[in-house]
Image (tube, grey):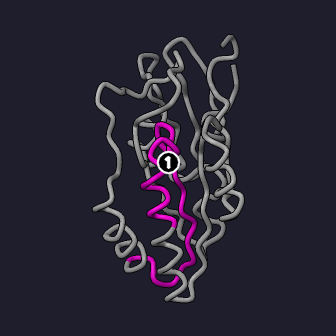
Amino acid sequence: KVFTVQGLPAIRRADGVWVFSPYSRQIIHLPRACRQWAAALSKKHLGTPYPYGPLGDLDRAHISFLLTNGCNLRCLYCGIRREVVHTMGPDLVQPAVDFVFHHFRRQNLVISFFGGEPTVDFDSMDRLYRAFSAKAGETGREVQFTLTTNGFFPIRIADLLIARKFSVLFSMDGPADL
């Protein structure tokens, strides 16, 4: 059966899933026992399959922050382990911003937030947004923000995302029978 994994063409066979990455020019085998596709993909260094590839939009650096492994849902198909919930924490915000601005000096930035469910750690997301926005103002650089979410968050967060002009990707994934 042909389908997509994070926007990449994939084939499901008895021994697992086979994914072709145009970014790494590799065919990657995801064994049937693999429950965390995203972890397997990142180990193979696929790059950023959506929305920007490494050959497009070269004037922008795309930086993703995994804010937390916590989530406000408990989907049966999800492979993220949550015995202990980890969050980014306030002490990492300024060093992260300084690191990004130091190492990506020429590019404008696209900052993405994901998790678990990133709005579970909205405090870290808010601190990062404020710090990146302030630094962008100081340096004259453009920063855009994106969020990958399940969409289950308070309306006050939705209002802030709209006011801050976030691009929002709603994750509605999982097996079709769910």
State the residue in front, 31 or 161. Answer: 161
Name the residue beneath numbered marker 1: 46
Q: Which residues are magenta?
A: 103-129
How far from the left and from the top, in percent, is residue 74?
Answer: 50, 21
Which residue appears farthest toward the front when viewing the image? 156
State the residue in front, 19 or 6. Answer: 6
Residue 153 vs residue 165: left or right?
Answer: left
State the residue in front, 127 or 20. Answer: 127
Badge 1 amino acid: Leu
How far from the left and from the top, in percent, is residue 124?
Answer: 42, 55
Q: State the image quarter where residue 33 is shown.
A: top left
Q: Is-magenta flag for residue 118?
A: yes
Residue at (38% x, 77% y) in the render:
103
Residue at (54% x, 56% y) in the render:
112
| Above-or-below relation of 153 to 136 | above
Query: Split into 4 quadrants, where in the image is the C terminus?
Result: top right
